[in-house]
Image (cartoon, rainbow, N blue to C red):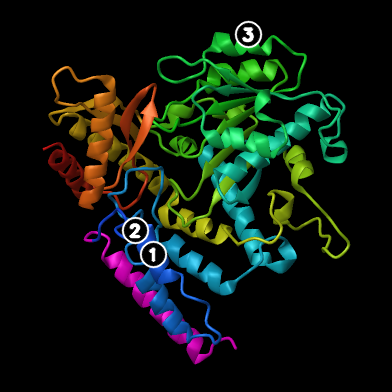
Amino acid sequence: MLGTAADRTALARAFAHASAWLKGLDHRAVATTASLAELRMRLARPLAENGLDPSEVIDRLVADTEGGLLGSQTGRFFSWVIGGSLPSAMAADWLTTVWDQNAGIRACSPAASVVEEVAAGWLLDLFGLPPESSVGFVTGTQMAHVTCLAAARHAVLSDRGWDVERRGLSGSVPVRILVNIERHVSVDRAIRFLGLGSDSIVPLPVDEEGGILAEGLSKALADTSQPTIVVLQAGELNRAAFDDFQTLAPLAREAGAWTHVDGAFGLWARTSPVHAELAQGMELCDSWTTDAHKYLNVPYDSGLAFVRDAAAHRAAMTVSTSYLPQDGAARDQLDWNPEFSRRARGFAVYAALQELGRRGVAEMVERTSHHAQALVAGIGRLPGAQVVATSRLNQGLVRFLSPAPGATQDDHDRRTDAVIASINRSGEAFFGGVTFRGQRCMRISVCNWRTGDADVRRAIDAARAALA
């Protein structure tokens, strides 16, 4: 029964454990400390015949996962592009769980539908995207790519007289997809999911800054024999490179191609007067993706898909059946995302936007970018370290050189991985490694609202100790 003593006690235990977790972020190791074998030994008990008291279940879960949780909520996590959770977003997410609304259609939860509708309008305004664009609240940029590229597939094949939703892909003209050679792999994965096949991908060369060369795109677009989708990038994974939207998007539009933007974290540059220039001209494209669980700092999972052509978006996603209510005034979420039953993701996004306001979002982008650049510069100045790339946003690369006489590229690569591992073992900070243009580097990424000057100093000190 709802509202029972067991409900209240279990929630109180969860709150106590959650409070302890948050309180201990500054003192707990950022890296995990328990091995997979330890975690399996604790967690893989035989399923008992009789159940346990809910409070005991929660206490056991917390005890058994100890050491197996990454401290990505802390301000000293700099590996993948992972944000934390703002207080309002975290609280709204808890309420989302308690309310337990199925946000698939408006009839299941009118409040969830309207909250998404309002938050979508705020986001379009915040990003300066065409106000007529439709918005889908999805799990992350991976599914946002699927959603946007499904709309693109619909549009470019419809232009050739082919109804892909009715007839499928067999027998249609093959779709060609022009991409940045340094794109994120989630783009390729979405293309596979949509049945377009990896052979449809045509990688285009980039300049030293990581942007697609205009002459390369023009040459590729000269072939109009196939329906074409162009995928541009706002924030490359390693050094936050941006394609030149002002130049490239008009070329694609003139050739009749659909232009899609991977803006998993880079789309947020448009919210800041300091960084907006990086993404100038992005509004000229046709679809855009981003993650709210990155820069907006809401809990997982929370991705966003934006499509200028709402009709194409809806045609690619919608479904109807006799038992679903028909109401033209309502926003049914299943018209805009690939899921049916789903979590009401809009509540946390709505709460975070209200907590921050327009200026707060911009300040968070500016502050995290400042900290990323301070980390790159500070670690890069240490003896034995070398800056490989910095950026005007929140990413950067450094590497660590082997002190051995006559050290080779392989020696420097091994030294880099060893230093990363040493920093992570210290528990003071957490970084990840990447191979960038043939050499191993330590990738620095900052998008957590908790990161402050003290976190940057601790991370630099941890790198200094590892190098020593």
Which part of the image, by quadrant, shows the C terminus? Answer: top left
Q: Which percent across, then down, holds residue 308?
A: 67, 35
Kind of residue at disc 1: Leu
Q: Quadrant of residue 89?
A: bottom left
In the rendered structure, which amino acid carries the disc numbered 3?
Lys
Q: SS at mark 2?
A: loop
Depth check, front residue: 298 or 283? 298
Residue name at image x 29 percent, y 51 percent: 75
Give the residue at x 39% y 31%: 238
Question: In this orientation, which residue lies closer to the viewer: 284 or 149?
Answer: 149
Q: Which residues are magenta?
A: 1-27
Name which residue lies at 30% across and 71% down.
20
Disc 1 residue crowd, few under 14, some 14–19, many 20+, Cα 10 Å: some
Q: Amino acid at mark 2?
A: Ser
Q: Quadrant of the N terminus?
A: bottom right
Query: Alpha carbon of mark 2 to alpha carbon of mark 3: how far?
Result: 52 Å
Residue in the image at 60% along x and 71% along y: 100
- From the viewer's perspective, is residue 320 above or below residue 43? above
- Tell me the residue that label 3 is attached to: 219
In this view, the residue farthest toward the bottom is 5
Q: Which residue is tagged 2?
A: 35
Q: CA distance from mark 3 to mark 1?
A: 54 Å
Real-space Cα distance between discs 1 and 2? 6 Å
Residue under numbered circle 1? 39
